[in-house]
Image (spheres, grey):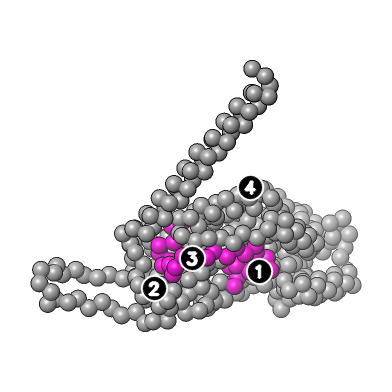
Amino acid sequence: MTDFQMSLIAAGGVFVVGVITYNKWQEYKARKTVERAFASDHDDVLMRSGAVGVDRQEPVLDVGMPGAEAMEPSFGAPTGAAPDLGASGGSVGVGTGAVAAAGAALEPLAPLPGVKPESPPAEVAESLVDPLIDCMIPLALEGAARGDKILPSLLKLRRVGNKPIHFIGLAVSGDWEPIVHGGVYTQLQAGVQLATRTTALNELEYSELVTRLRAVADEIGAEPDVPDMIEVMSEARTLHKFVAGHDAQLGVNLKSNGPAWPMGTLMGALEKVGFDVRPDGRFAMPDGQGGVLFTLSTNVNMGAENTDRLTLLLDVPCVAPARDGFGAMVKCAKELVGRLDATIVDDFEQPLLDASLEEIAGQVKEFYQEMETSDIPAGSTRALRLFS
């Protein structure tokens, strides 16, 4: 048998395998369509897209029908019910424990930075899927869908790499909202964060996202409109370049003028000026609104008995200008100087005089103005998501 004949046989085999694979895929899609069409938990007719805006009515049982068996109807929360956005992520009052847990689990992976629990749902939605820092992927639904019905599928897709993924839905009220149990949605949007402090969204992560999202979309009867990878990668690299260029942390050090400080005495002094102890051994100065102004490190292991050097550190892009994080940190350092008999020094053990501190304060103001101009103000939800 000649090489040409062998090539023809191989090509024919590949063609046959391709035809079989294609037929199997078509059979699978048809089966899924039939399963959805004849599923036992059909959507209420009042939830279909043509009935948006119609008030839901409690069903009235016709007890006069002979032979009819009385049944107690049960429903989820009303269409217009506001979702529970509390930190605990509780369910919206009704439903099985599994559904309630699903509703709770679809809250952000951690409390969304910069968003208060009492914020309106539309405001929370804008923070979850933000066109400036997220790749937005619309998902067209076959018809209006209940939150409790699509939540289990959406819960399967929360991250690719270290990039968080969130979903929001267009409620029948006309507002975009987080997907919650009890809600009814006519459209969905997925958003994957384009960059973090460490990396930009890359091709491998995006490919994984698209593959997994298509699987989720197939489960809920939706069709994703996936953006072009080249454009998304360009946006991700541009955003990460901004993040890398504004990842500024400012530190001032306190050096003991005498013997090293005993840790027991030191911890008491730090607590008196307002520091809270973190599990990692660092101290955090709260901003009075649940956030952190700056941190302090003792520069030794937790089991150490003493230290002769402290470092106060300000995460500049994570603190709003109105908080004056740098000014508060310098003020705290000067207070500790008096309490601990220390000198404020830089990383090279050179004293930091007032003139130098004022110059740094001016640079911090310029930094804040630059972030404001870029529409990512320091301390905003956008900044906290990018620099967390």
Q: Which mark is residue 47?
A: 2
Q: Which mark is residue 303?
A: 4
Q: Secondary structure at mark 4?
A: loop
Q: Nearer the viewer, mark 2 or mark 4?
A: 2
**Residue 245 in the image, given as x and y percentages of width and height:** 80, 62
Helix, strand or loop at label 1? It is: loop
Residue 37 location (% of width, % of height): 37, 59
Which kind of residue does numbered mark 4 sit on? Answer: Gly
CA separation, marks 1 and 3? 21 Å
Asked if the residues shown at circle 1 and circle 2 are in contact, with their CB atoms under 8 angstroms apart, the answer is no
Q: Secondary structure at mark 2?
A: helix
> Could you tell me which residue is drawn at 46 percent across and 60 percent down?
221
Residue nearest the viewer, comparing 284 with 143: 143
The residue to which callout 3 is attached is: 141
User: Which of pointers 1 and 4 indicates the residue nearer the eye?
Assistant: 1
On screen, 222 above or below 82? above
Crowding near the residue tagged with mark 4, few <14, some 14–19, many ≥20 C-alpha atoms within 10 Å: few
Q: Amino acid at mark 3?
A: Leu
- Across and down, in percent, residue 255 comes to 80, 58
Residue hosting label 1: 131
Quadrant where the N terminus sits is: top right
Which mark's residue is nearer the viewer, 1 or 3? Answer: 3
